[in-house]
Amino acid sequence: MNVSVPAPRIASFLCDKKPATGSRGMVVTNHPLASAAGAQMLLAGGNAIDAAVASLFALTVVEPMMVGVLGGGLSHIRLADGHHVVIDNLSTAPGKATAEMYDCLSDEIGKQRDVRDRENVVGAKAVAVPGALKGWCEALERFGTLPLADVLQPAIGLAARGFIVTPYLCNCITDNAGDLARDPGLAAMLLPGGKPLQPGARLVQPDYAESLKLIAAEGPQALYGGRLGKALADYMAANGGLIGEADLAAYRTETREPIRGSYRGYEIVGPPPPSSSGVHITQMLNILEGYDIGALGFGSPDAVHLLAEALKIAFADRAVATADPAFVKVPVARLISKDYAAERRALIEMERTQSWTAGLSGGESADTTHVTVADADGNVVSATQTINGLFGACVQIPGTGMIANNYMFNFDPHAGRALSIAPGKRVFTSMAPMMALKEGKLAFALGLPGALRIFPSALQAIVNLIDHGMSLQEAVEAPRVWTEGGVLELEEAIPEPVAEALVARGHRVVRSPRIAGGMNAIAFNEDGTLTGAACWRADGTPVAISGGLARAGARFTI
């Protein structure tokens, strides 16, 4: 999909994957078997919501390091009538949680969340009240068309029969082997004989298959008041965790109106706080709108410099002004205003980088997954869900196969701050399930995993499409940049002369093999077709559907 005239490029890169095009539906997830599960729902007559929920359940089996029923996330849904809704099923702090529950080790940039014994990363004390299962079932009940039991069948089959381990999953197990070995269930499942499962091995999860069957029979009550919830609460009580059955019974999702901004004739739509993406992507686009980004060329020193400065401005404001709106008054109108962007833009210097502090006063996760789904009727889902870190808290609830989140890491363990811990407070997130419209028609939808790097990466894809005229495949695969703590990270495909020019402006440049995770996206083409794309950073796979039923009145004759 080309949405503008291609501009000159400085950075050169090749796409690893190919897009898919269809006319009757599209499912793009970060695993081929999950994309197949969603496509199965569309082919069975279901809609995009049915397909997205089926894909998410399947991902809990084939991407166990990324997502689970004990996680949380955001689902950005555009219905066929054009209405947008965001279902917030982010995790919350347990009722027994306190602002001083962890022993903080540092307040340095990049180390603010370091606590003694990594208690907010690994183990029962890192687990927040899960919202994923509640949110997925609610989305299905409100907007889907198929029964929960039908939507769960692909995931149940994958858990019971097993699936083939990919190199990507093997790498994730290997990278976290030390933490996984601490949990008997995960060690037995992922480290047989003390060694990581290898590519080509079959991973079977019989306990988890039974848990999914229970959910199919009982619905979300299996966790929020039933046997699965009791198993979770019992484990927490025995291992120093804080979640009780009362926390599960009290959990509620939130339905939120999205943030809407404008950029060069496009309407940009994203989730509101406690997600930072809708607010701060809009803020950064407002800043960049004052420059002819396309004319600068993708990957040029000027273009990268402006991206870096806009990112630093947004993160400075985000640190003090964006959190759970039930606990902190978030100045949304000010943050997304064109006037405020003009004030911040006026302080940018093209010849040198600078440190930024917040321009106003106000009152996370490492690994995630994303699905993007569209059906033939105009329903679209962009959903980002996670158990937070790789394999969450590296805790499997005995007898259930469920892997617990470590969402407590997303809170600031220091007291007295916007992101400090409070009972019932929703975790803060950088998830960016985004959509863009042109003249009232949907142009593209996208999202990705990647912790703090999620919404800056989503911003760059939007700029790639609108300013640089990239195809959808190019936009999701293009090399990315990221900045934090005075360091500017550049993916390796950005040429060395560009890096040298940025160093000359005062940037402290480091090279990174990968910034954020596997983005996937759908473009809505003028001819009515859909294009799906997934990038090289994960096992992402688009599945396109075309064709359809026989023409009305068709008969078979000999």
Image (cartoon, rainbow, N blue to C red):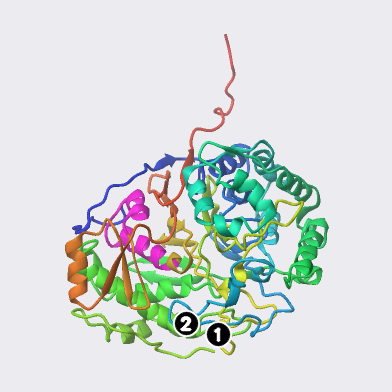
Label 2 crowd (10 A; few <14 / some 14-19 / many >=20): some
Asked whether residue 435 appears in the rendered view, the answer is yes
Disc 1 is placed on an element classified as loop
Along the viewing direction, whichever of 53 and 232 lies nearer the viewer: 232
Q: In the structure shown, which secondary structural element does the residue marked by tag 2 occupy?
A: helix
| Residue drawn at (28%, 47%) of the image | 14
> Which is the main secondary structure of the residues drawn in magenta?
helix
Numbered circle sitting on residue 418: 1
Left or right: where 501 falls relative to 227: left
Residue extending furthest toward the top: 558
Q: Nearer the viewer, residue 377 or 20?
A: 20
Please tell me which of labels 2 and 1 falls first in the chain.
2
Q: Quadrant of the C terminus?
A: top right
Q: Which mark is residue 319?
A: 2
Residue type at tag 1: Ala
Q: Which residues are magenta?
A: 455-479
Few, some or many residues within 10 Å of mark 1 (<14, 14–19, 20+): many
> What residue is shown at x 64% (from left), y 47% (from top)?
189
Q: Are marks 2 and 1 in contact (CB under 8 Å)?
A: yes
Q: Position of residue 542 (x, y in %)?
A: 46, 43
Cα separation, mark 2 vs mark 1, equals 8 Å
Query: Is the residue 433 above or below the residue 195 in the image?
Result: below
Disc 2 residue type (three-letter): Ala
- Camera-nearest residue between 109 and 554: 109
Residue 475 lies in the magenta stretch: yes
Q: Quadrant of residue 181?
A: bottom right
Measured as percent of width and height from the top left, residue 172 is found at 51, 52
The answer to whether residue 58 shows anywhere in this view is no
Residue 439 % position (x, y):
39, 61
The location of residue 408, given as percent across then percent down, is: 61, 72
Please tell me whether residue 52 is drawn above or below residue 506 in the rendered image: above
